[in-house]
Image (cartoon, rainbow, N blue to C red):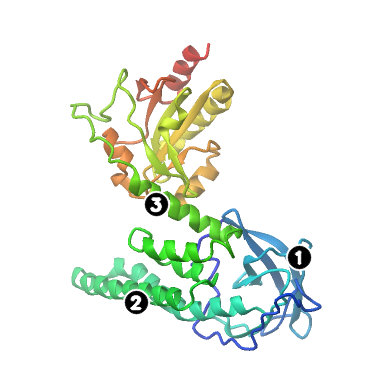
Amino acid sequence: MKFTPLRILFLAMTSGILISGCANFGNNAPENAGTISGKLTGVDVGASIILRSFKNGSLVKVAEGTTTENGDFFVTPEVPLARGFHQVIINKRWPLVLITDSTEAPNIQATIPLENKYLTDALIEGSQESSLLAEFYAVIMPLQDSLLDSQTAISTLSNEQKTEANKAMKMLIAEIDKTSLTFIKENEGHPATLAALEPLKIEKHAAAYKSVLKSLATSFSDSDYYMMLKKKYDASTTARTIPNQPPPKKTNRKNGQYAAGDEALDIVMADPDGNVRKLSDLRGKVVLLDFWASWCGPCRRENPAVVKAYEKYNSQGFEVFSVSLDSNLDKWKNAIEKDGLVWPYHVCDLKGWGNAASRAYGISSIPHALLVGRDGVIIETHLRGRALETELEKLFK
């Protein structure tokens, strides 16, 4: 399961959570350190309890157990937990997030709601950082849910109603931003403040990202969650310092402002993990510059031909640089995985048809592919299916 911040990993944070009995054991770990236990009311005997850790952008299962007749449970991972973000999920439906490690023994007591998607009145003992995280989500999750409900319902409203709904959503976003920034200010140096960055747009709140990351650089920088946000911030900073790319060439071509013989314009953009990728880094290889999108049927039908070409010629110096015109990160990532696009050079700025690279290249329809030579000069354009295979046969004969 791929990790989606806030809406998935932290789904269990609810306005009804009550926290008490927090403990910081320091070097004096309890006898049952590393074990997460609890007592649940409202579940059947044998309810599934799964412990997952956030690693490399995914939630990875590290232990599992079941509830007893009395609702008691405990899970102990075979490999000691590293300090970071972890998730307990009950019956694959009710998650609860912890910030803990193998020196703590968090204990969770909660009543499972019949319909509510959140755990309510949960009592957590034995993990101070988990408690602070829960306090934040107790406030932020209801606001996030209200915003999500408004976004879902707006398509059914009249134009007049939409105007009012948009005003209400702007107010909700402002309140979410204020809540997150206040939490960060009041809890400097606590890992839970990383979660408060998630609702904030990095373009608008770069200072908050920089402050939180700096405050945790010594104490929490080894955690996967910290590293993910650090990559996101670094990619944003790099993008802001890159000189403006030249404007698109003015020609009368129907699709694409660059043709065979033109030098390919460099593309600098982030991949799905926030790493900055540059087309110019592939100088010395033959590169298929492929403009596509997950929502484009012809593009998806063309992908098997690109995969076939990559598998056949990659070892000989052939690479693919894919530029997506997506606006939804999850759909983009899912399409990459589903279509088997295994090359590492996937970039997108999530602006749809406003994608900076496609605008610079004058792309008006997709799929659109250009074959770029080792010297950075375009060899051919509008390559699809057999035409791509024929061109590559000439080059790698």
Q: Along the horizontal axis of the image, is 259 left or right of 186?
A: left
Amino acid type at mark 3: Ser
Upstream in sequence: badge 3 or badge 1? 1
Q: Which mark is residue 77?
A: 1
The outermost residue toward the right is: 31
User: Would you place residue 111 above or below residue 129 in this image?
Assistant: below
Amino acid type at mark 2: Glu
User: Would you place residue 131 above or below residue 336 in this image?
Assistant: below
Q: Which mark is residue 290?
A: none
Q: How far apart are marks 1 and 2 (CA)?
A: 39 Å
The outermost residue toward the front is: 218
Which residue is painted at 70% across and 76% down in the image?
Answer: 26
Q: How far apart are marks 3 and 2 (CA)?
A: 24 Å
Which residue is painted at 36% across and 68% down in the image?
Answer: 152
Which of the pair 256/250 is nearer the observer?
A: 250
Residue corresponding to mark 2: 175
Upstream in sequence: badge 1 or badge 2? 1
Q: Position of residue 12 (x, y in %)?
A: 55, 75
Query: For the N terminus, which image quadrant?
Result: bottom right
* Residue 94: quarter of image: bottom right
Q: Residue 236 carries which label?
A: 3
Q: Along the horizontal axis of the image, is 341 left or right of 124?
A: left
| Mark toward the viewer: 3 or 2 | 3
SS at badge 1 = loop
* Residue 291: quarter of image: top left
Q: Position of residue 163 (x, y in %)?
A: 21, 71
Which of the pair 56/151 is nearer the observer?
A: 56
SS at badge 3 = helix
- How crowded pointer 1 is (Cα within 10 Å; few <14, some 14-19, many 20+) is rated as some
